[in-house]
Image (spheres, grey):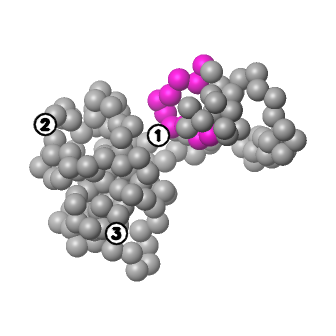
Amino acid sequence: MTERLNKGLIDFGVLFEPTNLSAYNHLRIPVQDEWGVLMRRDASLAKKERIAPEDLWDKPLILSRQQKEGGALSVWLKQDFSKLNIVATYSLLYNGSLMVDEGMGYALCLNHIINPTGESNLCFRPLFPKLSIGLYVVWKKYQSLNKASEKFLAQLKELIE
């Protein structure tokens, strides 16, 4: 996202905490998203209402490529990534959800990106203790915005206020 912003290929992006905002103007979105586990409805952990770190220590995990050792998720897990059974990574959660649906493992992800309701084979369970993340809409500092982008930004500011 930041690469595309920096190259001028897109006007706006959404970044998750923690992130370096020094190169961008930004608006904090006044909601937080919650980390959890995307899994098949027939998975052993699907019976639980919430997922604790130790529930995942021996499970095949599918993580976002953006997760780093020492990050919030790593700290929450209370384990070094090298000690976990990480079987795959995803750059788009949709791809991760396909791996989960095929039975490859459990995807650690944010809620509200994939909708596992209705006839979906998947379900989402939140982490406990709860792990939330803030979101920012960002745009490059000192960049001239076209009229459509200016209108979008004005409406976004109005909605947030």
x, y (%) of residue 4? 60, 35
Q: Is residue 47 visible?
A: no
Q: What residue type is disc 3 on?
A: Leu
Residue for point 49% across, 57% down: 112
x, y (%) of residue 17? 49, 33
Whether pointer 2 and pointer 3 mark residues with C-beta atoms closer than 8 Å, the reply is no
Whether pointer 1 and pointer 2 mark residues with C-beta atoms closer than 8 Å, the reply is no
Q: What residue type is disc 1 on?
A: Ile
x, y (%) of residue 66? 39, 37
User: Earlier along the polypeptide chain: callout 2 or callout 3?
Assistant: 2
Determine which of the numbered discs, if any, sits on residue 133 in the image. 1
Q: What residue type is disc 2 on?
A: Lys
Image quadrant in which the N terminus is located: top right
Q: Secondary structure at mark 2?
A: helix
Q: Which residue is mark 3?
A: 122
In this rendering, the label closer to the viewer, 1 or 2: 2
| Left or right: 113 in relation to 81 | right
- Determine if the magenta segment contains residue 15: yes
Q: Residue furthest right?
A: 147
In this rendering, the label closer to the viewer, 3 or 1: 3
Residue for point 39% across, 57% down: 95
Magenta-drawn stretch, dominant element (helix, strand or loop): loop
Q: Residues within 10 Å of mark 2 (few under 14, many from 20)?
A: few
